[in-house]
Amino acid sequence: RSCSGQSSPGQIITDKNMRLPVWRQAHLLEENIQMKDKIITAKEAAAMIPDGATVMVGGFMANGTPELIMDALVERNAKDLTVMCNDGGFGPAFDEEGKEVTPPRGNGKLIKNHSVKHLYATHIGLNKQVAEQMNDGSMEVTLIPQGSMVEMIRAGGAGLGGVLTPTGIGTDIAEGKEIYNIDGKDFMLEKPLHADFAVLRGNIVDKKGNVFYKGTTKNFQVAMATAADTVIVEAEKIV
């Protein structure tokens, strides 16, 4: 089933010709003020994201991940990013001689490039480089239950103070968290998530920032679009 959504104040991105519509919040003083051109290249989009930024990345197992922007961030050798996403993408595959035979996909591109300082994700089992970098101390990893994470993002977009959830009660996840008992049941407070940038991918995007997501590519993307200061959407088709 196809779904559609609208991004928050931010930006939009690219088709196969590497041209991207960018949607930024504008406070129009007069009705006849013209909106600026919203088209930029993937390279220009990557240049907007500084080292050390917090970035939400859409996608689920690379389904719906903005691959062109991932490539552009790797090309500019982005560093020290805090990335919030469903997973660590797919890592590269190597043959017996250690030669790469399958390139990484999704967030796996940033992880292979050592662009990520801190990864927030719901699972990391698809990419062994996540565990390698976590164990050698080069990348911090925070694992969050999937349902909790999307609600924490939604809370960040709605300006709420957090989410009360029973998920994680009695586990290591609850250590150091505030616990509230409501009607005899314990709930844990998960604080909202917010990012400097949300980097998403839409199937059909118009120049006003409306995004159509096909099927399961919707995943985290609609919630993420509300929870970032700047939204960049890689578009398969611009209308």
Image: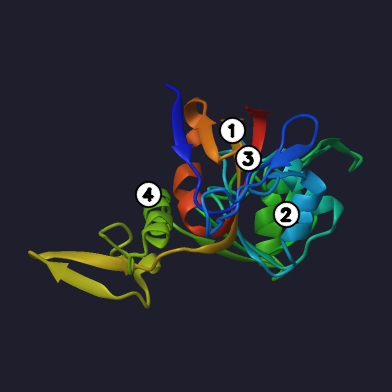
Give the mark, 2 or 1, whose residue is nearer the N terminus: 2
Q: Secondary structure at mark 3?
A: loop
- In space, the residues marked 4 and 2 are separated at their CA atoms by 24 Å
Nearer the observer: mark 2 or 3; the answer is 3
**Residue bearing the label numbered 3:** 65
- Amino acid type of the residue tagged 4 in the rendering: Gly
Residue 178 in the image: above or below residue 5: below
Q: Residue at 92%, 40% (x, y): give it.
A: 97
Q: Secondary structure at mark 2?
A: helix
Give the mark, 2 or 3, whose residue is nearer the N terminus: 3
- In space, the residues marked 1 and 4 are separated at their CA atoms by 27 Å
| Residue 112 visible here | no
Residue 213 in the image: above or below residue 107: above
Q: Residue at 55%, 62% (x, y): give it.
A: 195
The numbered dot on residue 205 is 1
Q: Secondary structure at mark 1?
A: strand
Give the mark, 3 or 4, whose residue is nearer the N terminus: 3
Residue count near mark 1 (Cα–Cα under 10 Å), binned few <14, some 14–19, many ≥20: many
Residue count near mark 2 (Cα–Cα under 10 Å), binned few <14, some 14–19, many ≥20: many
- In space, the residues marked 2 and 1 are separated at their CA atoms by 28 Å
Give the mark, 1 or 4, whose residue is nearer the N terminus: 4
- Amino acid type of the residue tagged 1 in the rendering: Val
Give the mark, 1 or 3, whose residue is nearer the N terminus: 3
**Residue bearing the label numbered 4:** 147
- In space, the residues marked 1 and 3 are separated at their CA atoms by 15 Å
**Residue bearing the label numbered 2:** 111
Give the mark, 4 or 2, whose residue is nearer the N terminus: 2
Front one among 75 and 210? 210
- In space, the residues marked 2 and 3 are separated at their CA atoms by 14 Å
Circles 1 and 4 in contact, beta carbons < 8 Å: no
